[in-house]
Amino acid sequence: MRQRYILKSSNKEKTTDCSATPLYDDVNKNIERLLNELGNSSDVSVRMVESPYQNTLKAAVIHLDGLADESIINENIMTPLIQWLKESNQVVTAKEIEAQIPQMLTVSQLTIKENWHEFMSAVLTGDTVILLNGSSRIFIGNTKKLQSRAVTEPTSQTVVRGPKDSFTENLRTNTSLIRARIQDSNLRLDSMKIGSVTQTDIGIMYIQGNADERIVEEVKERLKEIKVDGVLESNYIEEFIRDDRTTIFPLLLNTERPDAVVGNLLEGRIAIIVQGTPFVLIAPAIFSQFFQSPEDYYQNYYIASFLRILRFGSFFLSMYASAIYLALITHHQGLIPNTLMVSLMAQRERVPFPAIVEMVVMELAFEMLREAGIRMPRAIGPAVSIVGALILGQAAVEAGFVSAAVVIIVAISAISNFTLPSTSIVNAARGFRFILILISAFIGLYGILLMTLCIWLHISSLRSFGIPYFSPFAPFDFKKQKDTLVRFSLPSLLKKHQNK
């Protein structure tokens, strides 16, 4: 899909630029051109208003049904305009009525433009355009009515204690949730549009003085370089602007929690908000961030530190449990205690497949159950996952297709995944799990050690907007260890940030 968008957008860049094309001073010609460009779409609303005293004095009020608020148009644009034309019984020119429009209309925001591109952009984004006969200028009233769901609890990164609101698909709603928490004049919001067809609004938020200006400029430059037809979700942006497009590790953090975004802004990071998605991107991001939950800061720091260590351990368990079991049972039986080895061999007596086939089949079966649980309707999805796992696991063991030990190992790996707060790092662990399984089946523990070295060398080489991805572990910085593997008390953390 991404390749298709790039190819189409490169073709569009060759078309004639209409950004500087002037408007006609004839209302009818402008309307005719608009309807031609929109293919006479049925949702285009054009309402003509004429003066009863002067035939040449007329105006057109144009908007798209469904995108513009009809009540605002009727009360703040149509009613004042009709009233003024009725009361003005003198002959007036277009220039004179232009001067009256800003005082006449009572919309919250009124701008004046003079080219065709801005005329089209205003209509397509839900604003209302007022055209005057005899004038090549347009008046754009802010009448957008974007349909958006209400602010609800987040579906991911849920917490027991802490805020219960989450972002929505509306960019302005999302920025308001952030501004409600940061009432500071240094909070900046820069906007741009990406996508030659969708013209998706992008917001870049940061706190001036906290964020590194060089990183802010780098983020803006990378966003400006994106040339696509459309942006449907923040992952489109993420894949284009991250430092290494080939790595499986996430180099930008994504979250739907306003409190998580605010916390990162206070630490000097940058938020990238995309219209149409509740997931906000955070840049730059480091490896340890993906093991931190917002609830870590809402409970005792001893408990938070324990849970962080548990998450790190779960990450490694998720990646290595299946591979280590396979290596031991296939190549290094001498490392297994005799009693346990006898039990494992007894379980495998009825299994007709090699250990590698047994393990891969069970891992793939779990992945299919997981995917089915996500895609099924919400009412029955969890039931399908739980019941399917129980029934399939028990039936597979009783039928002799797999051993009970393999079912236990796969279940442990799956549960370990669920302890991680970020789905991005979960996906990385899932990918490397299969690689480690295949290597351990052929080389054993030596292959696991070799692959581990390659993984950590790769992680150490990654950068997120120039920041070492594995910092503060590599390069090691003792002063920055207060909020990584463990969390120190909030007074010491806040003091650390104030002394920056």
Image (spheres, helix red, strand yellow):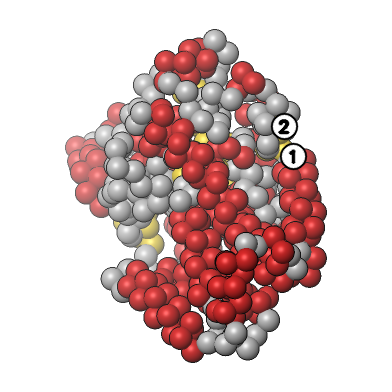
Per the image, the residue denoted by label 1 is 460
Q: Residues within 10 Å of mark 1 (few under 14, many from 20)?
A: some
Q: Is residue 447 above or below residue 284?
A: below
**Quadrant containing the C terminus in the rendered view:** top right
Query: Can residue 242 be seen in this snapshot?
Result: yes
Residue 260 marker: none
> Do the numbered discs 2 and 1 sit on residues whose CB atoms are within 8 Å?
yes
* Amino acid type, mark 1: Ser
Q: Is residue 11 above or below residue 471?
A: below
- For mark 2, give the secondary structure: loop
Screen quadrant of the N terminus: bottom right
Disc 2: CA contacts within 10 A as few (<14), some (14-19) or many (>=20): few
Q: Which amino acid, mark 2?
A: Ala
Relative image position of residue 280 (x, y in whole percent): 48, 44
Q: Residue at x 46, y 74 (%)?
A: 369
Q: Kindly identify which numbered label has been placed on residue 474.
A: 2
Q: Visible in this render: residue 127?
A: no
Q: Position of residue 76 (x, y in %)?
A: 24, 40
Which of the two residues, 28 or 4, is positioned nearer the viewer here? Answer: 4
Task: Give whichever of 103, 316 is nearer the camera.
Answer: 316
Q: CA distance from mark 2 to mark 1?
A: 7 Å
Q: Position of residue 338 (x, y in %)?
A: 62, 66
**Residue at 52% from the left image edge and 36% from the top image edge:** 271
Residue name at image x 62 percent, y 40 percent: 287
Q: Is residue 117 left or right of residue 370?
A: right
